[in-house]
Amino acid sequence: MRLYCPVCNKEFPLDIKDLACPESSDDGVHPLIKLEDADELSRVFPTILTKRWNEGKLSFSVFREFMASYQLANEHGKASWWLERVLALSNACERLTGRGFVRTPEIQADELAEAIDLPKGSLFVKNETLQLMGSHKSRHLAGAVMHLETLREISGEDQDKKTLAIFSCGNAAMGAAAIAGAAGYQLYAFVPDHVSDTVVAILTNLGTNVVKVSRDGNVGEGDPCNLRYQEALKKFGWVPFTSYGHDIWSAVEGAETLAYEFFFNQYLNDAALDVMVIQVGGGGLANAVISGAQICKRLGMIRKLPRFYTCQTSSCYPLAQSYFMVLRELGRDGVVTLPPELSMALESDFDARSVIENNAGQIKMTANLIAEMYPKIKEDIDEVFAKIGKKRNEFFKPWSGNVPDSIAEGILDDTTYDGLEVVRGMIETGGLPLVADEESLQKAFDLAVRHTGIDLSATGSAGLAGLRMLIKNNLIQKGERCGLLFTGVGERSCDLPIINDRVFTLSADDNIKKLID
C-alpha cells in the first residue's frame, strides 16, 4: 500500500510526514489517497474477514489490512502493537464517555420504506447514532489518531504529542474531543459563538479547549471558524484533526470502516445496494463512504458501485454549485457533450438549484450517459480532474448566499472541503447533487423518527429528504435497493457544568495569541 496524489500523479510512502501532497499550493490542497495492494486484501477476503466479523471484533481490527496505519506499523514489525493500541483506544474512550468504538447496525427499514412508497426489502439504514459520541465523526478521528500514533511509534523516539485542532459546529468536535482525550492529546476546537452550552459543557469536560468564533465577516469569505483554525495551525504549528481528507488524509480511512461494515454486511446477505443518498456538509462522510465503496468494488466485495447522490439544504448548497462547475469543465474540454440548453445555462453565473429545477431531465440523461461511458473516458476524466485539482479553490468556493440557517444545522458548511472527491464519485456512478427545502427536511425527520424509532437529529435524517426527492421524480427503479446513513444523535444533555477556564472567545479584532498567552 502507498499514498498517491491524483493531481500530481505522484506516489508517496506511508511514512510521509506531510498530511497532504507536498506540492499543494495556495490555489488548493492536493489531498492524498490510498492505493491498496490488491493481493494483500485478496488474502483476507472473504474467509479471514468473515471469521473476524463473526467473532465480533472491532471494525478497525476486522478490516486492519485496509488501513494504511496498520500497513505502516506492519512494515516496521509493529502489527501487534497496532492491534493492541486500537483496542486500548476504544477502551479509553469507553472509560471517558461510557462508549467505545461500535460496529453499528444496519436495519431493513420496511416500515419507513412503505411510508415513502418503496416496497419492503428495498431500504437499508445504518444507525450511526449508536457510534461513539452519537455520530460517524469519531471514526474519522480514530483513523487520524492511529496514523499519528503509528508515526510516533515507528520513530522510536519518545516524542511529545503535538497539540491538535479542529473546526466544527458540534458533532465533529465532540468526536474529536473523545478521541483526543482518550489518546492523550491536547485539543483546541474552533466552534461558532452560538454553539449550545450543552456542547461546550461536553467538550470542556472531555478536556478540550473551546474557542468560540464570531461571524463578523461577510458570507462568501468562508467559515470564520475554519479561518481562525487555519491561522492557529500556521501560528502555533498545531496538527489538523478534522474529518476531512482535505486536512489530513488519514481521516478518510477512519470513516471508510463505515463503508466496509455496510458493504460487507450486504455481501454476506447478498443484498447489494443500487442507490445511496448521503447528507453533505463539508463532504467528509460522503468522501469516505465513496472511497470505501471503491475499494470494496476493486476487491470484488460488491459487483458495482451504487449511484451516489448527495443532499444539501436549500439554505446552503455549495456542493451542487461545484458539481455543475465541474460538469461544465468536462464539457468545455470535450470529454462529454452537454445538451445545448444545459450547456447554455451553465455558461453564465448560475444558481445550481435553479439549474436543477429547470433542466432536470437533461441533467439526469447526462449523468446516466457519463456513468455508462465512464470506463471508456476515465483517462480523459482523470486529466480534467487533475487540472481542476490544481486550482481546486476556484471550483470549490465558499457559499456566497445568505447566512445559512436550517433545522439540519450540521450540514451548513460554507465550503465542501472534500467536494472534489465527492463530485468524482457522483459523476462516476451517475448520481446527482440534491437540494432539499426546509419543509422536506422536517418531513424526512418526522418520518425517520416515527418509522424507525431512532433518536437522531434533522441533520442525521437529511439523506432521507433526498431519497424522497428521487422517488418523487421517478429516479428509483423497480427492484432497486437504497441505502441511508442516519448519523447524529438527537437532543444531547450534560449534567456537568462548563469548565470556563477552557473556553475562549475570538472576535474579528482579537489576536490569535490570546489562546496561549
Image (cartoon, grey):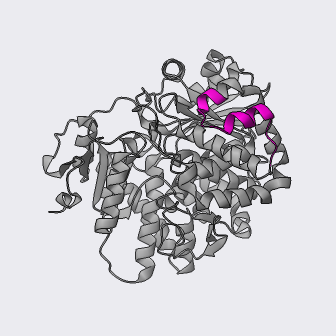
Quadrant that contains the C terminus: bottom left
Q: Nearer the viewer, residue 394 or 156?
A: 394
Going by the picture, which residue comes out furthest to the front? 348
Give residue 186's position: percent from left, percent from top: 27, 61
Give left or right: position of 114 versus 242. right
Quadrant that contains the N terminus: bottom right
Give residue 437's position: percent from left, percent from top: 52, 23
Q: Is residue 115 above or below residue 300?
A: above
Give left or right: position of 153 versus 498. right
- Find out whether residue 320 is within the magenta segment: no
Q: Is residue 33 above or below residue 75?
A: above
How many discs appear? 0
Give left or right: position of 209 versus 328. left
Find the magenta span and give its range.
336-355
Q: Residue at x 57, y 53 (%)?
A: 256
Q: Is residue 448 above or below residue 287?
A: above
